[in-house]
Image (cartoon, helix red, strand yellow):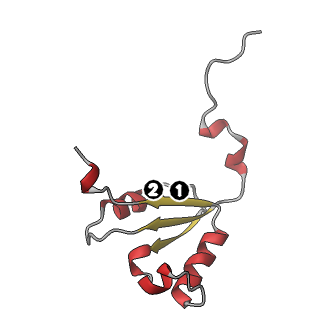
Amino acid sequence: MQPSTTLPTVADTAWRHAPAPRVVALYGSPSARSRSAALLRTALALLPEGASHGHIDIGRLPAQALLHAELAEPALAEAVEQLRQADWLFVATPRSEEHTS
């Protein structure tokens, strides 16, 4: 008997029967029309049925609390809790214009 040369598809994998995942989308962009955020919205729309999701916009977190890891700050504490409860984490960041050619 020859081994299969094809990889299993998502539909073939056992994990598709697992409970729906909790997903957190993490992003931050100085642009009001962020392509990173649009990409994450699209990815969230494609999640399996029953999946729950939340998002964290780093740009809306209090800067000083974030820089100093002040976890007592309510907005930062809420973001950390979302991350702790997530099964999956989607991260999108803007492209740096300095490093493009």
60 or 9, which lies in front? Answer: 60
Specify the farthest residue to the left: 101
Give neighbour class at mark 2: few <14, some 14-19, many 20+ (Cα, 10 Å).
few
Q: Whole-percent x and y of residue 50?
A: 61, 62
Residue at (56% x, 86% y) in the render? 70
Horizontally, residue 73 falls left or right of residue 63, namely right
**Residue 47, disc:** 1
Secondary structure category for the residue under label 1: loop
Give neighbour class at mark 1: few <14, some 14-19, many 20+ (Cα, 10 Å).
some
Label 2, on which residue?
43
Q: Amino acid at mark 2?
A: Ala
Q: Residue 62, can we see it?
A: no
Residue at (62% x, 39% y) in the render? 11
- In the picture shown, does residue 101 fall above or below 76? above
Residue at (57% x, 55% y) in the render? 48
Q: Whole-percent x and y of residue 101?
A: 22, 43
Q: Residue 94, can we see it?
A: yes
Q: Amino acid at mark 1?
A: Leu
Q: Whole-percent x and y of residue 81?
A: 63, 77
Tell me which corner region of the image, top left, top right, bottom left or bottom right, holds residue 3: top right
1 or 2: mark nearer the eye: 2
Q: Are marks 1 and 2 in contact (CB under 8 Å)?
A: yes
